[in-house]
Image (cartoon, rainbow, N blue to C red):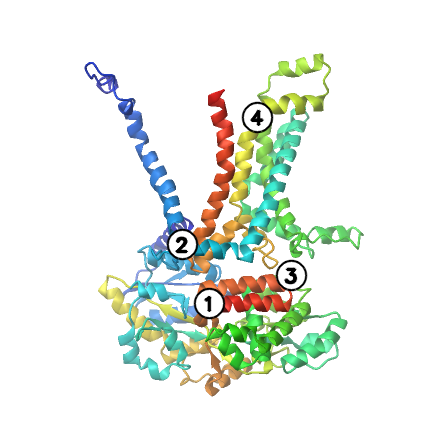
Amino acid sequence: MTVASEPPSHKGKRPSRLFKNWMAKLASLPMILTALVVFVGGTAWTVTYSFTSSRMLPKTSWVGFDQYERLWNTDRWIISIKNLGIYGICSMILTLVIGFSLAACLDRKIRFESAFRSIFLYPFALSFVVTGLVWQWILNPDFGLQNVVRGWGWESFTFNPLNDPNTVIYGLLIAGLWQGTGLIMCIMLAGLRGIDEDIWKAARVDGIGTVKTYVMVIIPMMRPVFITALVLIASGIIKLYDLVVAQTGGGPGLSSEVPAKYVIEYMFRAQNLGQGFAASTMMLCSVVIILIPWAYLEFGGKKRG
Amino acid sequence: MSNILKSALLGTALTAATATAVMAEGVELEITHWWTSGGEAAAVSKFAEAWTATGNTWIDGAIAGSGGTARPIIISRILGGDPMAATQLNHGRQAQELIEAGLLLDLTDVAEAGGWADIVNPSSLLDACTLDGRIYCVPINIHSSQWIWLSHAAYENAGLDVPTDWNEFVASSGDLQAAGTLPLAMGQQGWQQNIAFGAITIAVAGLDAWKAVNIDKDADVARGPEYTAAWEAVANARELARESNVQDWNQATNMVITGTAGAQIMGDWAQGEFAVAEQVEGEDYSCLPGLGLNPVLDTGGDAFYFPVNDDADITAAQKELAALLISPETQVSFNLAKGSLPVRGDIDMSTANGCMQKGLDILADGGVLPSGDIAFSQDTTLQIEDLMAQFWSGDMSAADAQESYAQLIEDAD
């Protein structure tokens, strides 16, 4: 081992940077190759074949932007994008607000904190498929929430979001929030616990109120925690698929379709790989458009400063 | 990525299944299919029994979920070099590219030995298995979609006679609604709505217009007055089904069985549900092929394909199985259990019930149409289903829907 760890001796020259820590680099080679071949290679392949008229099997018959033209002229795709937009914005804001509020409440040193923490985190242990089915039943007007409330005597109570094309996306949102906020709460709570007690003491000495301390002092200090939460929520939104399949199947009609479902259905059910690839490339584009300016601000800014 | 994962998972599951399968003499063939409901499983066991009786082993590779779930798994296994010995698919264009890629076994010699060209009725079923003069699949059964199922209980409660065609049904729907019954049960899924659309089109627009659009892909006819009338009838049917909140087709059938809905437009597989509920045709429910106006049936259905295999023993066994599936005894036992029509007209189906007899009569008279699986590619089919889903659940006008539909027909392949 001592031989291996000795630095390679090149007379008069500094060792090339490439061979510095070569053992570590060798060990990470499989991971590097996997990343390059599977992620970068797979992405490049998908984008390339989105410009072909591939049906069940990939073929190199180039059709230019035809698949994209068809994609953006398809009602179902437009509906999918709108749904993802509504779901995304609402889910992002509400998850952060509810997650932080719950964490702040638990942070006030209440009794049975760990019990509450488990209860709030518990839904996260369930898969989206189970979540979707459970909420499909809860929101079913004939034996779910509406039926229960009517049973209490409020006969005119109507709560049937899943069967109304205009509200079905909010039915999904409820299930998504129920499932996802627990995890965000835990991350926020960890962040709050990481704040030095002295900050609170200083705030108290200065006579700043609790809420104001949270908003003006604590939240800015928790920036890294918020970024972690944001990335987790955003990736969950983009890949929203299984919840929709389990809870509504995209219905009624097309009113709760999402882009990921479009990709899967056109690739496999319609046996139209080209169309599916075009849709998945658009999903990639939307992620890149959001991600690059953010990464630039977040990491590029720090290097300069 | 997900198809690789699925096939990997499936592979594991099947390895486990193979390990527990009883070893027997003869050749083991693994057969994949998506017949998993009660009646379907009973039907497929008839095949398994017949095959086991020849001294070979049937390894059942049932894939839960409908064809939409199973088909990608089956296709990705064939493409991925892990083919099963035989698999169910709907005949038509689903396997065309697999055939072109040389992945499916040529059955022409079996077909010639068995004289399939003479016995398969209607012959369009065999045409759907044929590419460039070679035969690649065995048609198993015929399922048709142009049926309306009527609940006698619902009409008795409203004090009405059970309608005998679509026009009477529409005329009586107001009284039915007044009696608190939903006239038309409809599962809120595109493929079911597409079936209803197809059936109403044949009844209202007539056969010639239907054929021009579905077979010749004539967009002008799809924009023409016959189709305008059809779309208006569909828009009317949409209002009759407005309160129908169910998703799955069997839930909608159940509404007809319990009498909470007057009727459902659904394929002949709905019979299985009536049978399970011990309803009697003519007493508890009625069936009208072609909605009682144009008694024709499409000839969709299932077929078996045999992926190419390196092993000569397996190839020989595949051909043996192909011949067995279409033999008279197997056809009778399977189709009676499945509630579907046999692919050959020369066998005795006298034990079948009234609805099946009506279907058999129509087949004998030659009132057959190609099914959607044969007429359109999967891509076009999904686009049409998307349009149907949008139309039935929303407030899209009949004229807008007609124009979108005509556009799809124009681009159809």
Q: In this view, does A98 lie to the left or right of B120?
A: right
Chain designation of label 1: B
> Residue A142, located in which quarter of the rendered image?
bottom right
Judge if badges 1 and 3 mark residues of a common chain.
yes
Alpha carbon distance from label 1 to label 3: 24 Å
Between B374 and B149, the one nearer to me in the picture: B374
Q: Which amino acid does label 1 sit on?
A: Ala
Q: Residues within 10 Å of mark 1 (few under 14, many from 20)?
A: some
Residue A64's tag is 2
Q: What residue type is labelled 3?
A: Gly
Between B284 and A121, the one nearer to me in the picture: A121
Which residue is painted at 58% across and 53% down in the image? A79
Placement of the C terminus of chain B among the 4 image quadrants: bottom left
Alpha carbon distance from label 1 to label 4: 53 Å
The secondary structure type at the circle numbered 2 is loop
Residue B394's tag is 3
The secondary structure type at the circle numbered 4 is helix
Judge if badges 1 and 4 mark residues of a common chain.
no
**Residue tagged by mark 4?**
A223
Which of disc 2 and disc 4 is earlier in sequence?
2
Q: Which amino acid does label 2 sit on?
A: Gly
From where the camera sits, is residue B193 visible? no
Q: In this view, does A163 lie to the left or right of B220?
A: right
The secondary structure type at the circle numbered 3 is loop
Alpha carbon distance from label 3 to label 2: 34 Å
Alpha carbon distance from label 2 to label 1: 19 Å
Chain designation of label 2: A
